[in-house]
Amino acid sequence: MKAKKSTRRRTSIALLIVLALVASLVYKLFDIQVVHASALTAQAAERRGTAITLYGARGDIVGDDGTVLAGSVLRYDFIASPVNALSAYTDAKGQALPQGQALAKLAADPVLAKLSTITGTPVATFVADFQNALTANAKSQYAPLISNADVPTFDKIEALKIPWLTAVSHPARTYPDGAVGGNIVGYVNSAGLGSEGLEQQYQKCLVGDNGEETYQASRDGVALPGSTKVTKAAKQGGTLETTLDPDLTWFLNQNLATTVPGLGAQFGQATVVDIKTGEIKAAAQFPSVDPNNIDSVPAAYRSTAMMFSNQYEPGSIFKALTAAAMIDTGYATPASHVLTPDKFTAPHGVSFGDAEYHPTEDMTLTGILMNSSNVGIAKLSAGMSDQTRYDYYKKFGIGTPTDVPFPAQASGILTRPSQWDDQTKYTTTFGQGVSATQAQMLQAYQALANGGVMVPLSLVKGCKQSDGTLTDVPQKTQTRVVKQSTSTTVLDMLESVVQQGSNSAALKTPGYRIAAKTGTAQEPDGHGGYQSDFYISVMGVAPVDDPQYLVSVNIGFPANHRMSDAAAPLFHTVMSQVLKTYRVSPSDSAPTMLPPYYPN
């Protein structure tokens, strides 16, 4: 009996010991995994070896056909381990040389001469990099020597098999098409952030998320096989899909580069819009910045696209909006007429005139547009209320930035009728005393050509994320601005301008019905007067029987020819290319030719 009790006692004691050991292990596990988890993780991180950033590449910006307008390529930084490099230099007894002597040996080593030949960096610069690293830490294993090496340079350096030199890859930005769409695309600054244009506006879409990998290194800095581990995966940036046609934009760039200097002008813009969708198919300016080399143009032209930022008094192309307001309200018809001298003095001493002398003529509204008469449009619309005209201008988008999300977009200037003085009441009818950007005028003409329905302009189709989802898709709410009948009537009048006006030969495209309006506008001096500088422009639609494309040409401050007819040849060239590029069917109906003068 006593033996049995002794056995049970020993069993109980053993069980208690086991339970105590288990409890101790559980406590230790809890202490490690919960209580001191953060501290132990940090300590492990210090001991786990070398950490390398895995860069999440910035996403591409692409044209409507997938052409890369902005992309990321691999570049390489080479990091030296000074302590390992200098340990190779010893005295006759195999002892490490003093640091100064070792650096002198390194400076004379043929390997640095080879690196210098490959990279173009002086040997003295490499030695200074070593010295700086060792001054900061006598046992330094980190001295950046070479940055942003391309793949051919990387291959040449790797072929040297330098044991104390390690390459780290990272993405860098490149713009394969250079200045094509450069002011729309923008560029990336030295901090890797989007600067200007789409690069800035869609930073959130494009930026990647960096990851990290670690490895254990041997004494000479070489990664131990099998020790590399990815601790955080990198995420690539999204792909920004634009509406731009790169080939067409290149064509516009090339022709602007010829036309602008030929006219002795300072700058120029040309844009193509799909009327039915509001998509901007091509946008060019001269000078245009090359994002690969932003110093290629003067600082004034490195910033955001002029079509959104540069507001100016649009001049005679604005007359189509005034005509649309008169037609839509029933105030006038294409045949409405008024006696039109070349100079006019209104009540209260207000005076203005047409660009060229002409005898007093009984012009119809069509003739007023054809002759681009300031006097005619002001006199004919004089009985229309200022508020009504203002309301129509607002509906056309004047005085409000377009819906295109783009940095530094100007809103233009359209003051309320209560602020109009006696002069402004008249001059707003022909595009003076009001300012707009080229983008706003494009938006207004898009609505005018699209049966009176405004479809917001767009530059981006969306951002395709790395998982395939599409974000940043523009939300488009269509708005009726004028009646369908008004749209048809105004296009008929603008077609009559092309068919019968003085610029007829330059504006026509054989086989297609074209509607267009030319314009000449002076630059305000900021003191109520005007400078001697002019803008010349053309806004045109084709084909009139099925409006599909809108082309805008705007030349700033020409010295050799200041009349709007100087912009007509470029408009013709661009419109002809657009119709050819998109295989638009020729018109199968006769053009409209409304009478420009009231019959005597």
Image (spheres, rainbow, N blue to C red):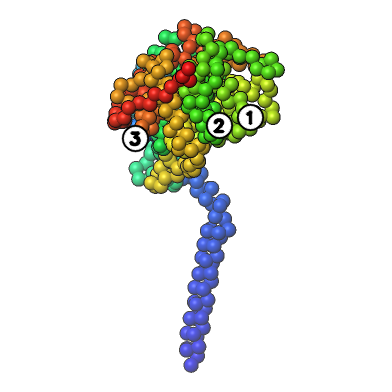
Amino acid type of the residue that numbered disc 1 sits on in the rendered structure? Asp
Question: Would residue 225 be seen by someone viewing this image from the given angle?
Answer: yes
Give the CA distance from mark 3 to mark 1: 48 Å
Query: Three-letter amino acid code at disc 3?
Result: Gly
SS at mark 1 in the image: helix
User: Is label 3 or label 1 in front?
Assistant: 1
Q: Residue at x 40, y 20 (%)?
A: 498
Pointer 1: what residue? 386
Query: How many numbered discs, if any?
Result: 3
Q: CA distance from mark 2 to mark 1?
A: 13 Å
| Kind of residue at disc 2 | Tyr
Q: Nearer the viewer, residue 281 or 225?
A: 281
> Residue 544, percent across and down?
38, 30
Question: In percent of the image, x 37 and y 41: which residue is there?
Answer: 224
Q: Give the percent coordinates (x, y) of residue 157.
A: 34, 25
Q: Residue at x 43, y 22 (%)?
A: 595
| Location of residue 194 in the rendering, given as x and y in whole percent from the top left corner | 50, 31
Disc 3 designates what residue?
66
Residue 269 makes an appearance in the image: no
Residue 283, x across and y down, in percent: 43, 26
Q: Distance of mark 2 from mark 3, alpha carbons?
A: 49 Å
Which residue position holds label 2?
331
Q: Earlier in the sequence, mark 2 or mark 3?
A: 3
The image quarter in which residue 591 lies: top left
SS at mark 3 in the image: loop
